[in-house]
Image (cartoon, helix red, strand yellow):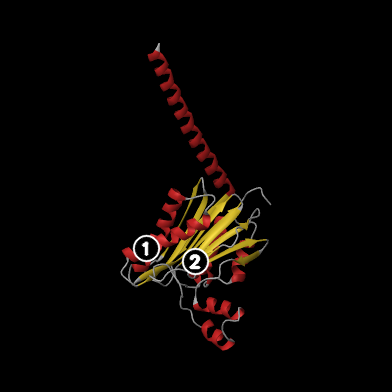
Amino acid sequence: MQNINEYTKILIIILLAIILIILIIARDFILKRINKNDLEIVKDIVIGREEIQEDFLDSVASPCGTLAVLADGLGKNEAGRLSGIIAVKTIKNMFLEEGSREKIKYFFKKAFNKVNLEIIKRVEKDKGGASVLSVIVIDNFLYYASVGNVMLSVFRKDELTKITEGHSISEVAKNAYYEGKIGRQEALYALKEKKLLHYIGEESFKDIEVYKKPIRLKKNDIIVLMTKGIYEGVRWIELEEILSKTKLTLEEKLDEIIEVAYNNNICNGSIILMRYLGNKK
């Protein structure tokens, strides 16, 4: 009788374990379906004048939300390309392994610091780096972090609004002028400079532009992630006109933006469009 009881206990434990596994799989499947249905994502890279393609991008959905990340590498020879690839793959892998629906700022800071260490470790000193932009969409909220001269904007009701400030000397000087930290002549001089002030891959790296509070998305908002090859190659008004075309699919809008950028013979550029399709207004 005792053996039968022990056998019954083992069967119950096995059964409970199987039920737990099924529930976890079902939960992950449902969350992935929710993320997939709420977001439509298209992305592409345009080849411009530069010989080496230093841009890299990717996106992935998980139970913790949907992540998109793009990087614009900088450096000599293959250093920029390698830096961009390291940045995107590191953040994506960390999101899949350590992503959370709660401690998002902590995740961004940890991920960007790890990218910085990986680039320093794998790329010759002071030879490479990258501008990086990453966003996470959870339900109808947008969270972001960036370093360098990549840009995040949101298109809503025929208007494209810039979200990130960037880390070029001109952008930092403009903000310093408005805050009264530098004079007008200093600001005007700095505005002419295109040099990048901060990027991932420098030993002194510390500045991450991260959201103060998440952006509440509305149905049909389009999240736009761009490197300078796109936002410098396509006029802002052209971007708004293309994104406003209601008869075009999101894929067709992307193709038109890429075509304009290519015809303007710009530097290599990359872009991700994410349309929020949720029911929340």
* Position of residue 10 measured from the top left corner of the image (x, y, whole percent): 41, 22
Farthest residue in the top direction?
Answer: 1
Q: Is residue 241 left or right of residue 199?
A: right
Report the front residue among 275 and 9: 9
* Image disc number at residue 48: none
Is 51 displayed left or right of 67 in the figure?
Answer: left
- Residue 249 appears in the picture as rendered: no
Query: Compared with residue 19, is residue 32 higher up or lower down, i.e. above or below?
Result: below
Callout 2: 10 Å neighbours few (<14), some, many (20+)?
many
Task: Examine the rendered structure and indicate whether residue 190 appears above or below residue 208.
Answer: below
Q: Circle 1 sits in a helix, a strand or a loop, which is it?
A: helix
Which quarter shows the N terminus?
top left
For residue 88, side relative to residue 252 (left or right): left
In the structure shown, which secondary structural element does the residue marked by tag 2 occupy? loop
User: Residue tagged by mark 2?
Assistant: 208
In the rendered image, residue 190, in percent from the top left (x then y), is placed at 52, 83
Residue 169 seen anywhere in this rendered image of the structure: yes
Residue drawn at point x = 43 percent, y = 48 percent: 97
Which kind of residue does numbered mark 1 sit on? Leu
**Of the residues under marks 1 and 2, which one precedes in the sequence?**
1
Question: Image point 61% across, 79% down: which residue?
Answer: 178
Q: Residue at x 59, y 86 (%)?
A: 184
For residue 29, above or below residue 273: above
Q: Which mark is residue 117?
A: 1
The three-letter code of the residue at mark 2 reads Ile
